[in-house]
Image (tube, rainbow, N blue to C red):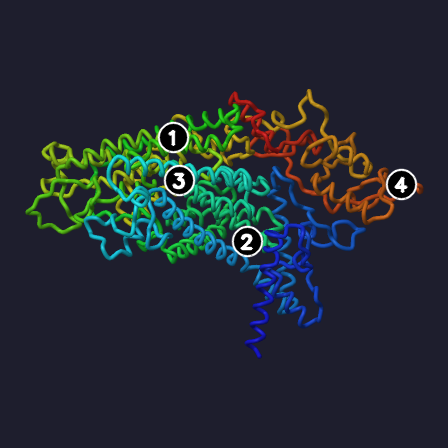
Amino acid sequence: GTIYTYLFFAAITSVLLLLPLFQSTFCRDKCNFPLVGLIKVDLILSYLIDSLTVGSSSGISSATPTEEMNGSGNLMDFLDEPFPDVGTYEDFHTIDWLREKSRDTDRHRKITSKSKESIWEFIKSLLDAWSGWVVMLLIGLLSGTLAGVIDLAVDWMTDLKEGICLSALWYSHEQCCWTSNETTFDDRDKCPEWLKWAELMTGHSEGAGAYLLNYFLYILWALFFSFLAVSLVRVFAPYACGSGIPEIKTILSGFIIRGYLGKWTLLIKTVTLVLAVSSGLSLGKEGPLVHVACCCGNLFCSLFSKYSKNEGKRREVLSAAAAAGVSVAFGAPIGGVLFSLEEVSYYFPLKTLWRSFFAALVAAFTLRSINPFGNNRLVLFYVEYHTPWYMAELVPFILLGVFGGLWGTLFIRANIAWCRRRKTTQLGKYPVLEVIVVTGITAILAYPNPYTRRSTSELISELFNDCGALESSQLCDYYNNPNMTRPVDDIPDRPAGPGVYTALWQLALALIFKIVITIFTFGMKIPSGLFIPSMAVGAIAGRIVGIAVEQMAYHHHDWIIFKNWCRPGADCVTPGLYAMVGAAACLGGVTRMTVSLVVIMFELTGGLEYIVPLMAAAVTSKWVADAFGKEGIYEAHIQLNGYPYLDQDEFTHRTLATDVMRPRRSEPPLAVLTQDSTTVEDVETLIKDTDYNGFPVVVSRESERLIGFVQRRDLTLAIKNARQKQDGVVSNSVVYFTEDAPQLAPNNPQPLKLRRILNLSPFTVTDHTPMETVPFSTHQIRLLGIITKKDVLRHMAQMMNQDPESIMFN
C-alpha cells in the first residue's frame, strides 16, 4: 500500500509539473485548467498534504509581492484577495534592486517564522531552501542535453554539404567511417559507405566535373541552411538572432526585455543555431549557448514562485545559467563560473557562486555523458602537449598578444561601423537578403581552401594539435629521420616538407578571409557567436608563427636565442601551443576577458605549465586593445543598441547630482502626487499625459517634502481594481497615501487609500552628492528632482561628445 501511495503522489506531482508548461507553451489562453493558475512547484507537497489531512481541495495560500514587501495585509483595505501583477515591471524598464531585496527578505522572514508552527511548515521551508539547488540541477541537465544535441546535429549537417553516409543517413563522415570494416589507417577519411554528392549522382569522384558539382551543391546546401535559419528567426522569434550576450548583460543589470528569454526564443534559437553553424558562416555556437542556457534558467524560474515573483532572485539564477552555458560551450566548468562573474553578471553574491559552480558541473557532466564528439571529451579541440615552454618563447607569445589586441580593435571598430550602417540605411530592411548574400560569398570563397571549407571547430582542432608520428595532416608533413628511435610523444624538431609550406600559404589566405568575412557576419539576423571565429583568427596566426619559430630553431640552433635551450635533435618548439596562445590573445582582444579566458584555455589543454604563456598573451592583448578603446565587443553593441547598461565602475566625471537631475531650469516642473489631495481623475490624467516609470509623493505642492515613491504600473492596477471592486470610487474620489483618511466634506465620494503600494524609503541624496550615488535629489528634505539610469547615461554620453538621445530605453 505504501508503494502505491508513493506512486500516486509521483503521478499527481508529474501532472502538476507538466500542466503549466503545457498550457503556457501550446494552449496560450485557449486552455482552462483550474489548477494551473493556482499551483506552483514549490507548493505541491504542501498542497497534497493539506488536501489529505484537512480535506480541502484548494488549501494553498501565497503572499502577493506587496504582502511580502510590507509584511502582512492585503494590497488595499477594501480587497479580500490580492490581484495579480502588482509589484511587477513593464517591458523595457529597469527593476528596483532595493525593493526586490526587501521583498525577498520579508518573504524569507515570513517562511522562517512559520516553519516553527508545524512540521509541514518546516518541510515547506526546507523545500524553499532547496528550490535554488533544484533549479540549478534542472538548468544543468537541460542545457547540457541541448548542447549535446546541437553538437551532434551540427556535425552531421556540416558533413551533409559534402556527402552522405549510405549505411546510416544520420551518420556524419567520421561516424560513417568508424563503423566501416574497410577503412585503413592511411585513408581513415575514405570508406565505401561515405559518398560525396558527385560520386553518388554521377558515379565519378575525380575530375573537374565532379569537383564543380560538389562545389555547386556545397553552396546550395549552405544557402538553404542559412535561408531556413533567418526565416525561422524572422517569423517566429526575432530575439533569437545574434550572440545574445549583450542583451544578457543588460538583463542581468536589471533591465526588462519581455520574451528575450522565452520558450519560443529557446526553441527557435536552438534549431537555427544548428542551421547557422552548419551553413559554414564565420560564426560559432559558444556565445548563443549562453543565451540558450539563460532561456533554460528563465523557463525553470517560472515554476518556482520564489524566482518568478522576484526579478532580483531571477537574475541570480540567470547568472548561474550563463556559467552553465560557457561550461558546455568549452567544456570548462570553472571557466564558465569565472566568465559569468567577470563578463556578464551585475549582482553576484557568494551563494550564486556556489550554485553557478553546481549548475556548470551538472551541465558538463550531462554533456560528457552524451559524448557528442566520440573522444570522451567535452570539446572537439581538447589537446595535450608534452614539451615544456622556454623563457625565450615569451617574446613571440607577447607578440601574439599584440596581434590579438590590434585584431580586437580592428574588428570592434569595423563591425560597429558596419552594424551602424545596417541600422541607418536601407540595408537593415532586407535581413534575409543580407544573410543570403554573405552566405553565398562565404561558401564561394571557402570551398577551394581546405582550411576554410571545414567547420571552424575542426580547423581550430587541427591547428591546436601537436604533430605526432600518427598525424596525416599537411601541417605535419615533415622530413623524418629514418633512424629515429625516440618515443612517439617526443619527436624532435624536423625540417618542414612541401606539405607544410603549402599549408602555410593556405593558412595565410584563410587568415585574411576570416578577418574580413567575420566583420560582416557578426550581427546578422541569425544566431551568431564570436568566440570560435576570434579563436580561429588567433589560432591561424599562432600556428604560422609557431612553425616559423620551429624552423628557425632547427636551422639556426647555434643562434644565441636558441643555443641555451634548443639542442640539435631536441623537441624544442610546439607550434600547436602557439596556436592556442594566439587564439587566447585574439579572443581576449575582442571581448577584453582576462582571468576567465586563461582558465577556459587552461581547461582546454589540461596542463598547468602553460598558464604563464596564456596570461602573458591575454594581458598584453587587453593592454593593447584598451589603448585604443576601453569597450569590448559586447559593450560596444550594448551602446549601439541603446540599452541602458551602466557599468558599476564607469562614472569617472566629477559631476554633482544637481547637474544631472531632472527637471532642468528650462523644463516643466516635476510631476508629483500629493499625499492626500489628489483625485482619481488627476492621477489618471497624469498617467495618460506622461510616460514616467513612477511618481514621487510629497506632502503638498507648496512644501514638496518627500514622502515616498509609487510605481506607475502599481498605480494603474490599483485604480483599475478599485473601480471594479470598491463601491463609491469615482473620478473625483480623493487618493490618499497616509495611514488616516483626510478630513473631507460629508457629500464627498468615498476616498481611495493606496498606502500599501507606496515605497516609503526611496533612495535619496542631496543635490551636492557626487554622481557615484543616485537617484532622488533633496535639499534639507525638500524634493528638487529625480535621477534615473537613463539620465546618468545621457549625461555621460554628453560628456563624451556623443548623442545623448542614443539611449533609447527607460
Q: Which residue is mark 1?
A: 441
Under circle 2, the secondary element is helix
Q: Estimate the spatial distance between the alpha carbons at disc 3 and disc 2, rounded to whole Å.
A: 36 Å
Q: Earlier in the sequence, mark 1 or mark 4?
A: 1
Residue 73 lies, with reference to residue 745, above or below; the image says below
Look at label 4 and name its amino acid: Leu
Look at label 2 and name its amino acid: Phe
- Quarter in which the N terminus is drawn: bottom right
Q: Which quadrant holds residue 163?
A: top left
**Crowdedness of circle 2 by 10 Å Cα count: few (<14), some, many (20+)?**
many
Under circle 3, the secondary element is helix
Q: Nearer the viewer, mark 1 or mark 4?
A: 1
Under circle 4, the secondary element is loop
- Quarter in which the C terminus is drawn: top right
Say whether marks 1 and 3 touch (CB < 8 Å): no
Q: Which residue is mark 2?
A: 300
Say whether marks 3 and 2 touch (CB < 8 Å): no
Q: Earlier in the sequence, mark 1 or mark 3?
A: 3
Q: Which residue is mark 3?
A: 221
Q: Estimate the spatial distance between the alpha carbons at disc 2 and disc 4, rounded to whole Å.
A: 50 Å
Q: Which residue is mark 4?
A: 744
Q: Nearer the viewer, mark 1 or mark 3?
A: 3
Residue 129 lies, with reference to residue 55, above or below; the image says above
Q: Earlier in the sequence, mark 3 or mark 4?
A: 3
Q: Earlier in the sequence, mark 2 or mark 4?
A: 2
x, y percentage for residue 491? 14, 46
